[in-house]
């Protein structure tokens, strides 16, 4: 059966409507997955609106997929029908370039995003290359696992990439869809955790999620009070930052790491980097190996997103809830496609 039933938009910012397409024959490296649930990420909204200029229509969103394997291509490895798996931002990579061979599949120049030029997981089934189809460990709440597969690995990867010590002092900018998971990971990693917010009302929740200290950056002296203290700051927001002020909060060899897609150029003072040998970096999601490590870590330490649930048939309501900034903090759609 190659007919896949989904929800698709036919134009930018348009509503999603029932859509059926023919997926054709299963490719040798592909796996077909029956979707049980799929997270609604802010990247889905950006792609729906064509904010990044790379959307194609009809557009089927959905790249935080949890489901069960229904078919396995003849060249797919390590997977079997009936297995519970997850899929994140990527659906395929070339497996032969230096990035893939070194384990950095997510940096593959020929990598395919699950919703970039192909149809995603707001559907009854989806097809993905085997290497990006990750078995889910026991101990996860499957109803909440979807957001871990994109947002979760995105905030987890910097701890791996930068070899963050469990004794490090880590700041998290933004207590939202990404930030609320970053606080949990940083705390369970063993770090001293600092949350940056612009709302005093979020302090109690930030502490519940794992923050040891909460700083309201609307206060003029908030950053000055922690000057020279932090080893790593992870920014999860997509609005301009006080980069000079944040660099001043870093300890020598500290790092400001960008995850939020700020579209405006960043003002970076050279001396703010030179003195103290500080750096600014960024990263996308994570490799298949990083996904596995993140899922195992989350299962072991009880890290889970705070979620709201909608049936997939209410996808437009879910999008409007997200667009209005009311999601607390991630939305998961459960598959009710007949």
Image (cartoon, helix red, strand yellow):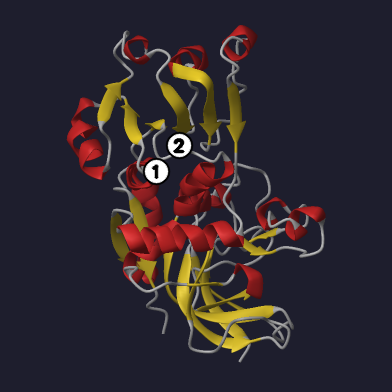
Is residue 167 toward the left or the right of residue 109 in the image? Answer: left
Q: Is residue 193 left or right of residue 33?
A: left
The quadrant the N terminus occupies is bottom right
Query: Which residue lies most toward the right here?
Result: 97
Relative height, residue 319 to residue 269 (above, below): below
Q: Residue at x 45, y 36 (%)?
A: 236
Tag of residue 182: 1
Residues 265 and 221: in front is 221
Residue 273 pos. (x, y %) = 60, 15
Q: Point out residue 189 in the picture as x, y percentages from the top left corner.
A: 38, 46
Cβ–Cβ under 8 Å for marks 1 and 2 = yes
Judge left or right: residue 27 versus residue 267.
Answer: right
Closer to viewer: mark 1 or mark 2: 1
Say which quadrant the C terminus sits in: bottom left
The answer to whether any part of residue 210 appears in the image is yes
Report whether residue 62 is seen: no
Instruction: Residue 328: give x, y in percent of width and height.
Output: 29, 48
Q: Which residue is mark 2?
A: 236
First in sequence: mark 1 or mark 2?
Answer: 1
């Amino acid at each position: 059966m190659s007919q896949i039933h989904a929800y698709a938009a036919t134009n930018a910012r348009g509503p999603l409507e029932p859509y059926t397409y023919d997926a054709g024959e299963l490719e040798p490296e592909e796996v077909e997955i029956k979707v049980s649930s799929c997270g609604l990420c802010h990247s889905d909204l950006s792609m729906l609106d064509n904010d990044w200029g790379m959307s194609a229509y009809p557009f089927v969103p959905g790249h935080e997929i949890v489901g069960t394997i229904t078919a396995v291509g003849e060249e797919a490895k390590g997977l079997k029908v009936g297995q519970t798996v997850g899929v994140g931002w990527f659906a395929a990579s070339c497996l032969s370039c230096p990035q893939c061979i070194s384990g950095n599949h997510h940096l593959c120049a020929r990598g395919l995003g699950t919703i970039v030029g192909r149809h995603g997981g707001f559907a009854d089934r989806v097809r993905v290359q085997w290497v990006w189809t990750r078995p889910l460990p026991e101990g996860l709440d499957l109803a909440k696992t979807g957001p871990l597969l994109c947002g979760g690995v995105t905030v987890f990867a910097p701890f791996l990439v930068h070899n963050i010590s469990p004794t490090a002092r880590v700041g998290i900018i933004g207590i939202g869809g990404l930030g609320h998971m970053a606080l949990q990971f940083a705390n369970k990693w063993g770090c001293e955790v600092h949350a940056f917010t612009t709302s005093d009302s979020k302090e109690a929740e930030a502490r519940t999620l794992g923050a040891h200290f909460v700083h309201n950056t609307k206060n003029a002296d908030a950053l000055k009070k922690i000057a020279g203290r932090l080893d790593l700051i992870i920014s999860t927001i997509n609005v301009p930052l006080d980069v000079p002020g944040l660099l001043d909060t870093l300890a020598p060899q500290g790092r400001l790491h960008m995850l939020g897609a700020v579209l405006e150029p960043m003002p970076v003072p050279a001396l703010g980097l030179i003195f103290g040998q500080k750096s600014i970096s960024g990263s996308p999601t994570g490799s298949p190996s990083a996904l596995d490590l993140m899922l195992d870590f989350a299962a072991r330490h009880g890290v889970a997103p705070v979620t709201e649930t909608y049936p997939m048939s209410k996808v437009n309501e879910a999008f409007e809830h997200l667009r209005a900034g009311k999601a607390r903090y991630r939305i998961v759609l459960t598959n009710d496609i007949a």
